[in-house]
Amino acid sequence: MRRSTGWLKHHRLLAFFVLTYAISWASWPAYASGLIPRMEFLPVGPLAAAIIVIALAEGRAGFRTWGRRLVRWRVGWVWYAVALLLPAVLVLAAGLITMALGASAPGLAQLTWGGLLTVFAVRLVNPLDGPLGEEPGFRGYALPLLQVSRPPLVSAAILGVLVALWHLPLVLFSGLSLIGLPTTFAITFLYVWLFNRTGGSVLLTLLFHNSQGTFTMGSFGFTGAEATRVELIYFVVVVLAVLATVALDRGAWRKAPRRATAVGAFSLRKRPL
């Protein structure tokens, strides 16, 4: 038992991602064998994997450190504005460009503030949805480990690839457009930027993720070729936003702040992979 625990302490990042994929993709073998009628993708995988790895490799000290990241709320009000409004601005920009190219958006007439707030509130507390299922794991646990010995730009690239590939079953079985994978990769850089600029606040990335899924391209009601076009435009808009952070806030990409890395008694000086 001690030997396995020692291995886990030195390979926490690897263990986290193996568990994340295994939990979220658990029904894939049964579906492929015809034992169940559909593939059930479980967004709770990252959250569950973080809890398991922390419990086995770090114990109470690890949970305290992780918990402080989850509830870190003392950041400037401007970052709350960024977390809540930037995702909507990116979607709105893509939608307006698509409309300027001649598309109609019947879905906008059906939107209400009450409906948007309800969706936002439900997603915020549902561990089987993306924000609460992903953020405590991907940003709250994996990213600080990545940033122990890597600059934020490299950490964001690694995390972006792994998070994008994690979404693969949604492309294969749930109708997510293939462009969703590179878009997920690109927007990961914005999550990392926000996480680091708020001193490692998972709460702020959770709000960002929640906002991203509340007002979406689907809100416009585009169909057919217009729906495909807006997704491509959205990808370009996200890439431009990432490039803007790199060009205008270079300091954020040189070195992560101490509170956004896995420092402390259980952090390792070697690369934790």
Image: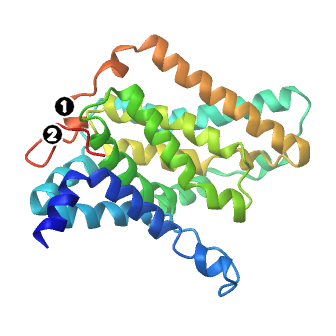
75 vs 113: above or below: above
User: In the image, is 146 to the left or to the right of 248?
Assistant: left
Q: Residues within 10 Å of mark 2 (few under 14, many from 20)?
A: some
Tag 1: residue type? Arg
The percent position of residue 127, horizontal first and vertical second, equals 43, 66
Using the rendered view, name the quadrant where residue 80 is placed: top left
Q: CA distance from mark 1 to mark 2?
A: 7 Å
State the residue in front, 72 or 252. 252
147 vs 167: above or below: above
Please say if the residues under marks 1 and 2 sit with CB atoms less than 8 Å apart: yes
Which residue lies under the disc numbered 2?
A: 263
Count the marks: how many? 2
Tag of residue 196: none
Decide if residue 125 is in sight here: no
Tag 2: residue type? Val
The percent position of residue 100, horizontal first and vertical second, equals 85, 26
Query: At x 57% / y 59%, what residue is drawn?
Result: 119
Using the rendered view, name the quadrant where residue 225 is placed: top right
Q: Earlier in the sequence, mark 1 or mark 2?
A: 1
Which residue lies under the disc numbered 1?
A: 258
